[in-house]
Image (spheres, helix red, strand yellow):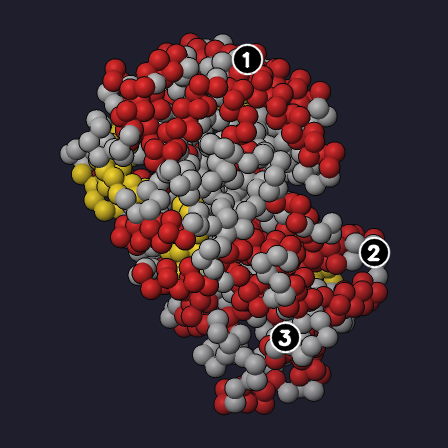
Amino acid sequence: MTSPGELERTLRENLRGEVDFGAAARALATMDASNYRRVPVGVARPRDADDVAAALRICAEAGVPVVPRGGGTSIAGQATGVGVVLDLTRHMNALVSLDPAARTAVVQPGLVLDRLRGAARPHGLTFGPDPSTHSRCTLGGMIGNNACGAHSVAWGTTADNVAELAVTAYGGASYRLGTGWAGAPAGLRELVSRNLAVLRTGMAGGFSRRISGYGGLDALLPERGVEVARAFCGSEGTLGVVTEAVVRLVEAPRAPALAVLGYADESAAADAAAALLGFGPLTVEGMAADLAGSAPGLPRGGGWLFVEMRDEGAARSLVRAVDAVDSVVVTDPAGQRALWRIREDAAGTATRMPGGGMAWPGWEDCAVPPARLGAYLREFRALLAQHGLRGTPYGHFGEGCVHVRIDFDLVSTAGIARFRAFSADLADLVVSHGGSLSGEHGDGQARAELLPRMYGPEVIRLFGAYKDVWDPAGGMNPGMLVRPARLDENLRFEVLPATPFAGEVARCVGVAKCRSADAAGPQVMCPSYRVTGEERHSTRGRARLLHEMLAGEIVTDGWRSPEVAEALDLCLACKGCLGDCPVGVDMASYKAEFLHRHWAGRMRPLSHYTLGGLPAWLRLIAALRLARPVNAAARRVPVPGLTRERPLPPLAVEPFTRWWRGSGRLDPARPEREVTLWPDTFTEHLSPQTGRAAVTVLRAAGLAVSLPPKGVCCGLTYVSTGRLDRARSVLRRTLDVLGEVRGPVTVLEPSCAAALRGDLPALLPDDPRAERLARAVRTFAETLEECAPHWRPPRLDRPVVGQTHCHQHAVLGDAADRRLRERAGLGGELSGGCCGLAGNFGFEPGHHEVSVACAEEQLLPALRAVPPGAAVLADGFSCRTQITQLAGLPDGNRARHLAELLAEAL
């Protein structure tokens, strides 16, 4: 038997791509977006088809299984494996060619779908199948799962849109598949000839979403044209590795319109869906109130159908013809995107139950003929209740495909037994309606064991024989589809300790929105992954490493793990994941907890004492009135523990509270209301002009301003460096000094406001004062909107550019800021993404290159395109500092806080 070390050496010697059998690489590949976990021997990143062939030959000689992997968003476990994982996203991700006249494209398996769609868009074309993970799923994964998406009612499944496939089998043999037997493996034609009756009868009665098993095997029938490439689709990596594909493109509608139809409930919407197919829709998607909630833009109803038509006229004709409770037609692209985002994020949002618990995949996408959908959903809801389970169905109602996350207990013995019993009962229910156990995402480990309930024994034997023609040694993704593992084996939760932190880490279900290829729009997550492209720097990758750290099987150093420390080192603690991740993974908090334990009892990096203790250092410098000599020294002498590539921002000679005590106490004669202005560290010592401007505006709005007693601090810098015990003591002292909170507390620095609103109650959960202060925190714009609703801000009537602070985006929200800017005549959108400085991150050694690259993604390009007369707006001190140091703006156009812009206009 070849040892892992020997196998690694042989692969390294024969592959041009990377081979990594280290703990981190293996840990990152243990899971996909399913409930399952399998530990691989190692990971290889082939550069081309020759590398793939070499890897498959070497692994076959060693008797080691192989699992091809794309974006890792499979939800049934088929992208996990115990042998060598072939990561096809790193190098084999090219769009080889695109032929608009022929409406075809040649793609490599690691190409992200949105990159293909973006290249096809200028030609008025698109790739029809579009799963909700389109911004990170790969074409190879879509072929493996026979993915569909929302537009399959118009354009079909991936199998319907594939013309040719280049495939390499276990052992290294290569094939070119299309239509006809040419290029097919030996024995396949004979297998079909011997089983014509089984193919014609045992797989009869299929419908568009019959994806389960080798559901396309009947495409090999002579009357079907012997579509070998089509039959290969949906094989879930069990037959061979796709190294190149020729795919068909379709004409994209120029101005699609979205008709949203409201019905009394989900079942009524499901009953209506099949009748809409005669109108030629592009999509017929369904969801109920327990998923969509009170989302803006929805018509009245308790269940909705999202029906996309080719143009506005077709959409309005549809609305006139149907019997819906209410309806709305949306033609504005931005409005359509906002509504579609509800649907696309459902794979994550459905994971969060109303009471705060979690729901999991496992029975994500059963499908029944559309005419049976209403009846099926009613029985499905009853079956959930019978087993004491809860779930929120949604999905492709026009094709009878239902997605759902269910609150299974996948930890206790009794909970796992219930999971197994429910799975069997649901399989029987689906089959009784003539349905398919999988309607989109494949069977993997979650459903393959139950395939005999859907197909007769002759079909199951044929599946095994089909697998053996392609893979006689059984080395391709064993345990999936044929001779499968049990559906209650290899559950990813069983290796975790029963701790609150483990429960938080397990929240990451792997839908990988953090790996999104879409850099546009307000999304922040995940800035370091966008720069490096490394899985370990994505939110999901970091969560997986923490998961394996807690499991202790691969990552064996526990909280002292260098692999986890390295991955978290480039986490900017921007909290973008808290706002953008559909399940609310909070990697900034996980990082703080890890650093707290990682450095417990040890000397920390110097930056944890310098930047981490910044409030104390700045208070001392201010008390000794040393700002000028410290500024002079900082220009000449590097500060220990900080990068030399970045100058330190100068300290204010007159701190904000010193100005306040001297001349800042004048309030309106008859104030309408009093607000407390929080003197955060940045406003106090680095940007007091922001505090003075805020006082001016708040008073102009008729508000009296007071400051809390000296010595208050939000603890942000201690949290971000993982000094959590110190953060707790600082926050307790702050609460002691602050006393009873009366009225709103206005915090100008978004990161400090986010720390008080989020980190404070989390760190001091047993202190009721913490929750009271958190509830009192307001941003500058929120204060004006709440406390001076009738005040009219000065009109600036000029465009703005800049950036919304990451913590404001994720924790606080910016709706009040948008409304205030609109009232002040400040037009334009602020950029998304992250400025890259992120508090202490950009000042720490080894981070400068990533910090600058983050700014280059959205912020700096927006500033270079600044229109004449535009104001540069950035409420965060870090954002303003990054802009000052990197943007090269004229001296008279520095970045300002919104309070400064309004104060100047007064």
The reply to whether residue 825 is visible in this rendering is no
Residue drawn 37% across and 38% down? 471
Which SS class for mark 2? Answer: loop
Is 385 on the left-hand or right-hand side of 586? right
Is 277 on the left-hand or right-hand side of 681? left
Distance of label 3 from label 2 (alpha carbons): 27 Å
In percent of width and height, residue 631 lies at 55, 85
Residue drawn 70% across and 41% down? 411
| Dot 2 and dot 1 residues touching (CB under 8 Å) | no
Label 1: which residue? 432
What kind of residue is marked 3? His
User: Residue 767 shows which numbered tag?
Assistant: 2
The reply to whether residue 741 is visible in this rendering is yes
Label 3: which residue? 608
Is 336 on the left-hand or right-hand side of 639? left
Q: Residue furthest front?
A: 1
